[in-house]
Image: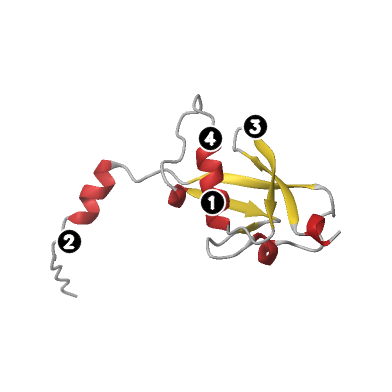
Amino acid sequence: MAGVLDQLEIKFRLTDGSDIGPKTFPAATSVSTLKESVLAQWPKEKENGPRTVKDVKLISAGKILENNKTLGECQSPLCDIPGGVTTMHVVVQPPPLEKEKKATNQPKQNKCVCVIL
């Protein structure tokens, strides 16, 4: 019975309402590994998909999950039903545009403004 409790069935809900999964993961699985799984299973026909694990945010029970945590540490005793499927929401953070990158790389010019009262 302990082996069943150490396994969590998770499906990932994308922003358009479609799902990836459900798939079973051990409770010791890291959030980073979950993100890699989402990245590998991302539907190819979807536009604006994540390029790296850093582009993906997983939300469970209203909390953004940290990469270094495990599923067992993130599990909410109030929301998770034993033997049920846990739904995690997937948010893709779009990569910064080239113009924004160039703007941040340029040093700021100091401008002096004098006000005479």
* Rendered residue at 55%/36% (across/down): 41
Q: What is the crowding at mark 2: few (fewer than 14 residues within 10 Å), some, or many (at least 20)?
A: few
Q: Is residue 94 visible?
A: yes
Amino acid type at mark 3: Ser
Label 1 sits on residue: 57
Upstream in sequence: badge 1 or badge 2: 1
Q: The C terminus appears in which quarter of the rendering?
A: bottom left
Lower position in the chain sequence, tag 4 or tag 1: 4
Residue tagged by mark 4? 42
- The amino acid beneath tag 4 is Trp
Name the residue type under label 2. Lys
Please, which residue is most extreme toward the top here? 45
Residue 14 in the image: above or below residue 113: above
Considering the numbered disc 3 on the image, is that residue within a helix, a strand or a loop? loop
From the viewer's perspective, tell me whether residue 28 is left or right of residue 32.
Answer: right
Which residue does the image show at 51% across and 28% down from the upper left? 46
Of 10 and 61, nearer the camera is 10
Residue 56: image x %, image y %?
Answer: 50, 48
Disc 1 marks which amino acid? Lys
Q: CA distance from mark 1 to mark 3?
A: 16 Å
How far apart in space, not on screen, are marks 2 and 3 (Cα)?
Answer: 43 Å
Badge 1 vs badge 2, beta-carbon distance below 8 Å: no
> Are circles 2 and 3 on residues that touch, CB within 8 Å?
no
Q: Measure the C-alpha gap from mark 4 to mark 3.
A: 11 Å
* Relative image position of residue 60 (x, y in whole percent): 67, 54
Place of residue 37 in the rendered image (x, y in percent of width and height, measured from the top left): 55, 44
**Residue on which disc 2 sits:** 108
- Viewer-side label of 4, 1: 4
Question: Which residue carries the number 3 mark?
Answer: 18
Upstream in sequence: badge 1 or badge 3:
3
